[in-house]
């Protein structure tokens, strides 16, 4: 019998949920909700109504939750061991925040640590509702999934969230580049993608570019970016391959 994972991607502005078969990463069904609440209690009430209204299965084999926030950073494991998550966050973003809102994920496959902010209400809501849930920052989850596949050949992965993208460059089983960029349009995505290609001197290198989306809006933006790249004939030797659903990858992280 195929195991089914309930995969969740949530940010301050939306929640995306899908039932995904572990065996083949096929999505059985999915649903989304826009979130623009004013307080933690309002967020929790909205989420409770949303999940209660799904009327999906009472129980799943696995649960995963990816938290989406542009305020995240990667650093080598050795550097993290000599500091603290709060100190790293303050250094990167210049904010003095409650230590309880800072979390981190170790990516042992890469010898990196992902440090990010996550509100208390997010953790408390999902742990209370789904006690077995595994949660990570969405970019850490994506990287972990990518590095369970073939990572020897050069690839650029553009991963969409609501209002920002993560761009990762992978080559010879190493993470060569990773950064987050706030975007609104496909033209913004193209600008940052070309910027990374130029900065990393990849125009004359062979490899692939793939896109990961979380809903129909980000899928459309990915397709538009793909077309904009196609219009730049002869720009580089990099070839666009997949435009795929990001929630599928969460099955590789549990």
Image: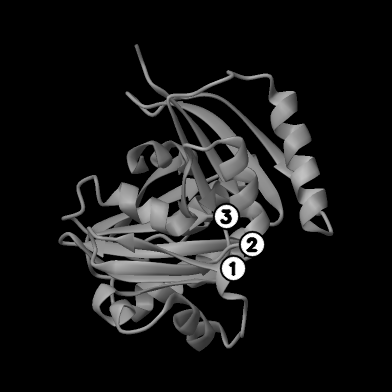
For marks 2 and 1, the one nearer the N-term is: 1
Q: Residue at x 28, y 71 (%)?
A: 202
Of mark 3 and mark 2, the one earlier in the sequence is: 2
Of the two numbered discs 3 and 1 on the same chain, state the one appearing first in sequence: 1
Provide residue 113's location: percent of width, then percent of height. Answer: 34, 68
Label annotation for residue 241: none
Number of the front mark, 3 or 2: 2
Mark 1 residue element: helix
Residue of label 1? 101
Q: Is residue 215 visible?
A: no
Q: CA distance from mark 3 to mark 2?
A: 17 Å
Which of the colour schemes (rainbow, by chain, secondary structure, one colour) is used?
one colour
Q: Which of the numbered marks, if any, corresponds to residue 161? A: 3
Q: Which residue is mark 2?
A: 119
Q: Are marks 2 and 1 in contact (CB under 8 Å)?
A: yes
Query: Which quadrant of the view contains residue 49?
Result: top right
Q: Is residue 91 left or right of residue 240?
A: right
In the image, 40: left or right of 121?
right
Whole-percent x and y of residue 154? 23, 59
> Which residue is depicted at the point 40% across and 58% down?
140
Mark 2 to mark 1 CA distance (whole Å) = 5 Å
Q: Is residue 98 visible?
A: yes
Question: Is 97 situated left or right of 89 in this image?
Answer: right
Quadrant of the drawing holding the N terminus: top left
For image coordinates 56% across by 44% down, the residue present is 127
């Amino acid at each position: 019998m195929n195991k089914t994972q309930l995969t969740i991607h949530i940010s301050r502005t939306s929640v995306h949920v899908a039932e995904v078969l572990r065996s083949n990463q096929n999505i059985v069904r999915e649903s989304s909700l826009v979130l623009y609440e004013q307080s933690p209690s309002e967020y929790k009430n909205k989420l409770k109504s949303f999940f209660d209204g799904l009327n999906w299965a009472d129980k799943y084999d696995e649960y995963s939750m990816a938290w989406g926030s542009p305020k995240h950073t990667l650093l080598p494991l050795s550097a993290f061991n000599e500091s603290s998550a709060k100190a790293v966050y303050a250094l990167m973003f210049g904010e003095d925040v409650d230590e309880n809102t800072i979390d981190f994920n170790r990516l042992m496959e890469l010898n990196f640590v992902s440090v990010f902010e996550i509100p208390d209400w997010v953790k408390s809501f999902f742990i209370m509702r789904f006690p077995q849930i595994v949660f990570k920052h969405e970019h850490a989850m994506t990287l972990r999934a990518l590095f369970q596949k073939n990572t020897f050949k050069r690839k650029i992965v553009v991963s969409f969230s609501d209002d920002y993208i993560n761009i990762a460059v992978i080559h010879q089983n190493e993470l060569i580049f990773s950064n987050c960029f706030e975007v609104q349009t496909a033209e913004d995505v193209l600008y940052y993608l070309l910027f990374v290609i130029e900065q990393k001197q990849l125009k004359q290198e062979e490899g692939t570019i793939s896109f990961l989306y979380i809903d129909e809006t980000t899928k459309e933006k990915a397709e538009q970016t793909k077309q904009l790249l196609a219009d730049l004939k002869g720009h580089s030797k990099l070839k666009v391959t997949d435009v795929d659903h990001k929630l599928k990858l969460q099955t590789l992280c549990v």
